[in-house]
Image: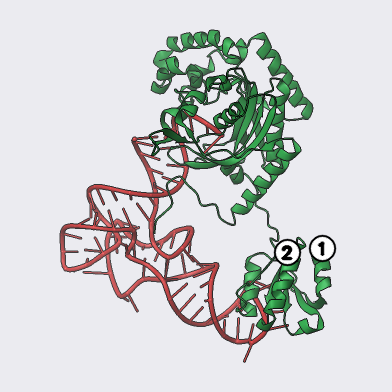
RNA sequence: GUGGCCGUAGCUCAGUCUGGUUAGAGCGCCGGGUUGUGAUCCCGGAAGUCGGGGGUUCAAAUCCCCUCGGUCACCCCA
């Protein structure tokens, strides 16, 4: 036996039923909100991520699946969607407003635990070319409605603004000065980040005492960033979307500015409880080679975690299971099953045309059929036996009545 | 990369401390009780290199050493 790789999952029934519901809900909402489908490469140039995501980020420093391909190029399995989608926007002309929805696996080489796999699945939305706070609000609202729609309970939203790059130069100095003063109280990791990535110290769990009194970006926003944030907030208030301001929320990727946010569920018990997050990333396009700025905002939701927080729904998977009692009638049954499926009914049957009625009933029960129709001696009179599995009630009816029954159920 | 816990049937686990009949149970699967009736009930069956290797012993799932895997947590993120 060759087992699956560490940190990868086979997603099979019954769990996969929730995935189907989630992906359908995402697809449906994306269409309603005007986002077009994007199917992106799972593999890109390593440089795209090192420049876009940031050299000093955890992801780039030690979590990427990077290797040399047969042509000697350094390539990387995507650890996230955004950099690749922005690359495609620039590569295809880089103009105007483009709204895209994407879904697929991402790869990060980490020690697996609950809610954290080496291959994990994300649904993703990117709103490119729009600088107004309304775009931030739209992707946040979309995410909230998606979680609501699939039945996640205890939805929480943390919101913050980390300001513009220009505001952050002054703020960064202030923070570094503060951290250096408290250096002796900091963890080793935090000390290392004072120079390379001081913002990340703000969400360090090991340094909560020092961080509590540290200056936060929210108090040092420039006037434009401050106005952007207050407009976004009042729009969210108007939509009735609850949130809490978390002044120490920063994101692990370097390209963010202004609005950042994170969704979680209070019912998902795990150390990795964030269901998704995102924010505005106006600086990214130029980091990866655009000759003009591209304002943009996006969100990525972790499907594996959302599915953990979704309720299971017991419902009949199939409208009908067709059991063949007289195997000479297999050709007629084949045609009837096909006709019903073409009309949109969910039908299954024993395609082997060899098993006993008893075995076919067992199969029907196992796959969650609402009823069984027996094709046997009564077929010559235009009838089948219809047995409703839940009640055990059985009667002989015409094939037209079977369809009526399924429609009214 | 570091630490805790766990590896026995397809799944969930008992048995390990205190070595000793043929390694068990529940669920699931297959068959029969009903050659046209599931779920429920009764009867039967298949299925296990006890994670792997080495050692101690008359004897190892059980004790010792090494190793591999899983899981949760730290770190970090979706």
Helix, strand or loop status at disc 1: helix
* Residue A316 drawn at (x, y percent): 70, 61
- Asked whether the viewer can see residue A68, the reply is yes
Judged left or right of residue A70, residue A235 is right
Give the colour in which the image draws chain B: red
* Residue A226 drawn at (x, y percent): 67, 13
Q: Output the letter for the chain in green.
A: A
- Residue that carries the numbered disc 2 in the rendered image: A341
What residue lies at 63% left-to-right and 53% top-to-bottom? A17
* Residue A247 drawn at (x, y percent): 60, 20
- Residue that carries the numbered disc 1 in the rendered image: A407
What residue lies at 66% left-to-right and 42% top-to-bottom? A152
In the rendered image of this protein, does residue A13 appear above or below residue A95? below
Mark 1 crowdedness (10 Å alpha carbons): few <14, some 14-19, many ≥20:
few
The subunit letter for the residue under badge 1 reads A
Q: Earlier in the sequence, mark 2 or mark 1?
A: 2
Tell me the CA gap for discs 2 and 1. 13 Å
What residue lies at 61% left-to-right and 20% top-to-bottom? A282
In the rendered image of this protein, does residue A184 appear above or below residue A15? above
Mark 2–mark 1 CB contact (< 8 Å): no
Helix, strand or loop status at disc 2: helix
Depth check, front residue: A150 or A406: A406
| Nearest to viewer (mark 2 / mark 1) | 2
The subunit letter for the residue under badge 2 reads A
Judged left or right of residue A17, residue B48 is left
Whether callout 2 and callout 1 share a subunit is answered yes
- Asked whether the viewer can see residue A389, the reply is no
The circle on residue A132 is none
* Residue A210 drawn at (x, y percent): 48, 17
């Amino acid at each position: 036996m060759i087992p699956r790789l560490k940190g990868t999952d086979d997603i099979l029934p019954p769990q996969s039923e929730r995935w189907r519901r989630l992906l359908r809900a995402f697809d449906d909402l994306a269409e309603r909100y005007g986002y077009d489908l994007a199917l992106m490469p799972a593999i890109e140039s390593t440089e795209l991520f090192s420049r876009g995501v940031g050299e000093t980020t955890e992801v780039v420093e030690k979590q990427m699946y990077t290797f040399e391909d047969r042509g000697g190029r350094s390539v990387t399995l995507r650890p996230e969607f955004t950099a690749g989608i922005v690359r495609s926007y620039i590569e295809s002309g880089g103009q105007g407003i483009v709204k895209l929805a994407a879904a697929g696996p991402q790869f990060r080489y980490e020690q697996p635990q609950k809610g954290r796999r080496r291959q994990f699945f994300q649904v993703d939305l990117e709103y490119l070319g729009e600088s107004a706070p309304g775009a931030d609000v739209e992707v946040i609202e979309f995410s909230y409605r998606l979680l609501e729609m699939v039945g996640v309970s205890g939805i929480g939203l943390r919101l913050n603004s980390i300001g513009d790059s220009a505001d952050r130069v002054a703020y960064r100095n202030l923070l570094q000065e503060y951290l250096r003063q408290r250096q002796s109280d900091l963890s080793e990791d935090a000390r290392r980040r004072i120079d390379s990535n001081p913002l990340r110290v703000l969400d360090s769990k090991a340094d909560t005492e020092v961080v509590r009194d540290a200056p936060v970006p929210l108090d040092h926003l420039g006037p434009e960033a401050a106005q952007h944030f207050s407009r976004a907030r009042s729009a969210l208030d108007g939509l009735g979307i609850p949130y809490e301001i978390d002044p120490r929320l920063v994101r692990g990727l370097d390209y963010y500015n202004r609005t950042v946010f994170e969704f979680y569920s209070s019912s998902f018990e795990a150390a990795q409880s964030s269901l998704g997050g995102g924010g505005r990333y106006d600086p990214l396009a130029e980091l990866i080679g655009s000759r003009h700025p591209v304002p943009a905002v996006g969100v990525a939701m972790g499907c594996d975690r959302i599915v953990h927080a979704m309720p299971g729904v017991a419902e009949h998977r199939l409208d009908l299971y067709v059991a063949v009692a007289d195997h000479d009638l297999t050709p007629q049954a084949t045609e009837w099953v096909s006709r019903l499926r073409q009309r949109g009914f969910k039908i299954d049957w024993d395609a082997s045309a060899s098993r006993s009625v008893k075995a076919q009933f067992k199969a029907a029960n196992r796959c969650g059929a609402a009823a069984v129709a027996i094709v046997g001696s009564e077929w010559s009179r235009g009838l089948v036996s219809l047995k409703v599995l839940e009640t055990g009630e059985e009667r002989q009816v015409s094939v037209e009545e079977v369809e009526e029954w399924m429609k009214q159920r």
